[in-house]
Image (spheres, helix red, strand yellow):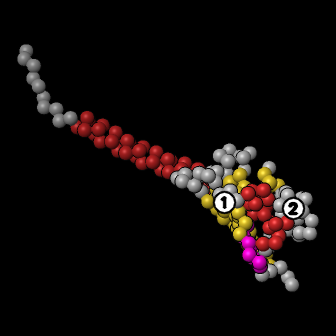
Amino acid sequence: MPKTFHKQNGYALLFAILVTSILLSAGLGISNIIFKELQLSAIGKQSTISFYAADTGIECAYYWERHAPTGVLGMTSTFPKNADEVVALAGGSARCAGADIVSKFLGGTPNNSVLATSDHATTTFTLELDSFVGRPCALVTVEKGSGVTLIESRGFNVPCSASSDVRRVERALRYRIQTLP
């Protein structure tokens, strides 16, 4: 008996390919959303690290704004308010996060300096938090003059020397201290 062939239209195969492609595109869409959520979560963590670095820097500066450095007599603050007090700071010591900040800003290394006139001074120093993963840092600026002290601390999630890092996150805090006459 001769074999007869029936024309098969392949609907089952077409339907299977269609369902598979729909499931594959849905899976790729979900994995893309998950990837973006993970990136957003990582940025949030780095932002928190930057904030803590800024907070450490501003609390250090605020503490030493209210206390004289060790080894210096006649000053009420670690940060000079004029050019005469810059000279008086030599030999003084003020420690934050394991580093002497006085020797840093008097040393004049990059991001560490004192600019002073007869009635105003701006002190800048970096505070490296070496005990943390990634070595976050804070760049702290203290401006004194005319009865007002401004403290600004900019915290970073990476070392201060890594300024070109594309994953660098910065958070800043500011204090304004008004001295009563």
Magenta part of the chain: 116-123
Between residue 59 and residue 80, name the one nearer to us.
Answer: 80
Which amino acid does the dot numbered 2 rest on? Pro
Element marked by disc 2: loop
Q: Residue at x 67, y 51 (%)?
A: 136
Answer few, some or many: residues within 10 Å of disc 2's Cα (few below 14, many 20 plus, some between 14 and 19). many
* Residue 160 spot, x, y in % from top left: 64, 54
Task: Check the image and report above or below for 88 versus 138.
Answer: below
Residue that badge 1 annotates: 111
Specify whether residue 42 is in view: yes
Task: Check the image and report above or below for 143 versus 158.
Answer: below
* Residue 4 spot, x, y in % from top left: 9, 23
Left or right of residue 63: residue 49: left
Element marked by disc 1: loop
Which amino acid does the dot numbered 1 rest on? Asn
Residue that badge 2 annotates: 69
Mark 2 in CB contact with mark 1 (< 8 angstroms): no
